[in-house]
């Protein structure tokens, strides 16, 4: 519980600002930040610290944002109140062209942060694969080789290559899903 209070104190203002920069009023941003931290509190027990805490919290905030936008769309899109005052960090107001640029910059930064974290998790997961399996996957992904070409290069059978790649995809998918980053490698299903 004490750890949660520290996270709340440290990140709550940043999460409120995150929502304000996405065209939500201050009151709505407070509500969304509270929803985010309810989810953080509920998820703390399952958090495996495979991702940085800040990345994990902002991933939850992004999911909260996407859920709210989905809900708003389901209710025939209503007008969103846009605050005219400057943001908590002294930046331009959310409304207007400058606000739109700030919103796009913030979203780009968050997406970049999430991609970097996902890449780190993928590299770690790849590093944990058995050496021959990792070699097959890397030849398949980086050099775009067919199963037969990989078999020739690694000295194993085509069936072994298929099994290695299948098992590696499953293991990577499980590892990334556990860390909340399942979008990355697991969707690749090209045929060879």
Image (cartoon, rainbow, N blue to C red):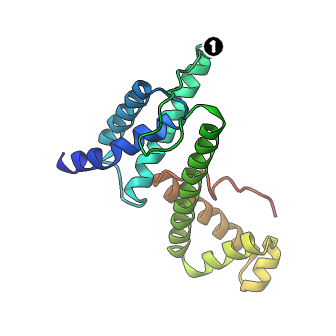
Q: What x and y, as percent, mark residue 59? A: 48, 46
Quadrant in which residue 52 is drawn: bottom left
- Answer above or below: position of 101 versus 175: above
Figure quadrant of the N terminus:
top left
Which of 93 and 1 lies nearest the eye of the viewer? 93
- Left or right of 13, for residue 176: right
Residue 82 is situated, as x and y percent measured from the top left of the image, at 53, 25
Local SS, label 1: loop
Residue at position x 34%, y 32% from top?
Answer: 34
Give the image location of residue 187, x and y in percent: 67, 52
Residue receiving disc 1 = 76
- The residue positioned 56% from the left and 62% from the top of the image is 116
120 or 62: nearer the eye?
A: 62
User: Left or right of 76: which side holds 144?
Assistant: right
**Which residue does the image show at 71% across and 82% down from the upper left?**
156
Decide: few, some or many residues near mark 1? Use Cα within 10 Å; few <14, some 14-19, many ≥20. few
Looking at the picture, how far across and down is residue 182, in whole percent? 56, 52
Quadrant position of residue 123: bottom right
């Amino acid at each position: 519980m004490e750890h949660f209070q520290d996270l709340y104190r440290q990140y709550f203002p940043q999460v409120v600002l995150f929502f304000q920069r996405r065209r939500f009023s201050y009151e709505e941003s407070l509500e969304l930040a509270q929803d985010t931290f309810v989810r953080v509190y509920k998820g703390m027990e399952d958090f495996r610290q495979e991702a940085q805490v800040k990345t994990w919290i902002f991933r939850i905030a992004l999911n909260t944002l996407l859920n709210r936008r989905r809900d708003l769309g389901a209710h025939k899109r209503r007008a969103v109140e846009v605050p005219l005052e400057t943001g908590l960090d002294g930046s331009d107001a959310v409304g207007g062209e400058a606000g739109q640029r700030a919103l796009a910059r913030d979203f780009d930064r968050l997406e970049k942060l999430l991609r970097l974290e996902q890449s780190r998790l993928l590299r770690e997961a790849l590093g944990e694969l058995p050496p021959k399996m990792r070699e097959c996957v890397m030849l398949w992904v980086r050099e775009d080789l067919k199963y037969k070409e990989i078999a020739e290069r690694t000295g194993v059978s085509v069936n072994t290559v298929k099994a290695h790649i299948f098992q590696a995809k499953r293991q990577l998918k499980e590892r990334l899903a556990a860390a909340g980053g399942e979008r990355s490698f697991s969707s690749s299903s090209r045929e060879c």
